[in-house]
Image (cartoon, rainbow, N blue to C red):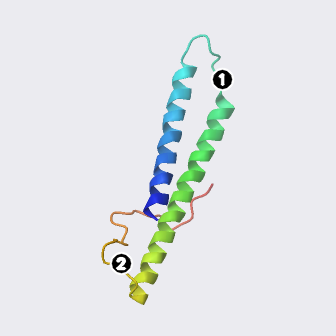
Amino acid sequence: MREAEAVADETILACAKLKQAMTVARSNPEVGVGSGQAALLKLTRAERNFAAAHTDLLRVHAELSHIASETAALDEDIPTEIKGADMPTEPIAA
């Protein structure tokens, strides 16, 4: 579970870095003002979708933690609580 959450975080970070690089590239005076606008919009949409997927992963983690606590199936060495997770209660619109 933690690995999937970490991959989701890395994906969101990679998208942010890509967006920054795209925006910097557009500041080149030889590049048209609207160049890459459609690509930026698509990337922004992808970022929203990745963030929504990450939220779903956190919800899965929380549900599995709840099941584990109800069935006493906790592993002593593996924490199951999501400390500091701020999960929205409403679905994220994609």
Horizontally, is 42 left or right of 19 in the view?
right
Q: Report the amino acid beneath label 2.
A: Asp
Quarter of the image where one finds residue 39? top right
Q: Is residue 61 above or below residue 25?
A: below
Q: How many marks?
A: 2
Disc 1 designates what residue?
Answer: 34
Q: Give above or below for 33 relative to 52.
A: above
- Secondary element at image label 2: loop
Q: Is residue 31 left or right of residue 18?
A: right
Q: Residue at x 56, y 58 (%)?
A: 53
Within 10 angstroms of label 1, few (less than 14), some, or many (20 or more) residues?
few
Q: Upstream in the sequence, badge 2 or badge 1?
A: 1
Q: Are marks 2 and 1 in contact (CB under 8 Å)?
A: no
Closer to us: 21 or 86: 21
Q: Which residue is the site of mark 2? A: 75
Residue closest to the far top: 30
Residue 11 position in % (x across, y down): 52, 47
Asked if residue 79 is positioned above or below residue 92 in the image, the reply reads below
Mark 1 lies on a secondary structure that is: loop
Q: Position of residue 54 (x, y in %)?
A: 51, 58
Of residue 71 and residue 15, the one placed in the foreground of this image is 71
Place of residue 78 in the rendered image (x, y in percent of width and height, measured from the top left): 34, 71
At x 63% / y 19%, what residue is drawn?
33
Amino acid beneath label 1:
Gly
Residue that lies at the very extreme toward the left in this rendered image: 77
Q: Residue at x 54, y 18 (%)?
A: 27
* Distance from Cα at disc 2 to Cα at disc 1: 54 Å
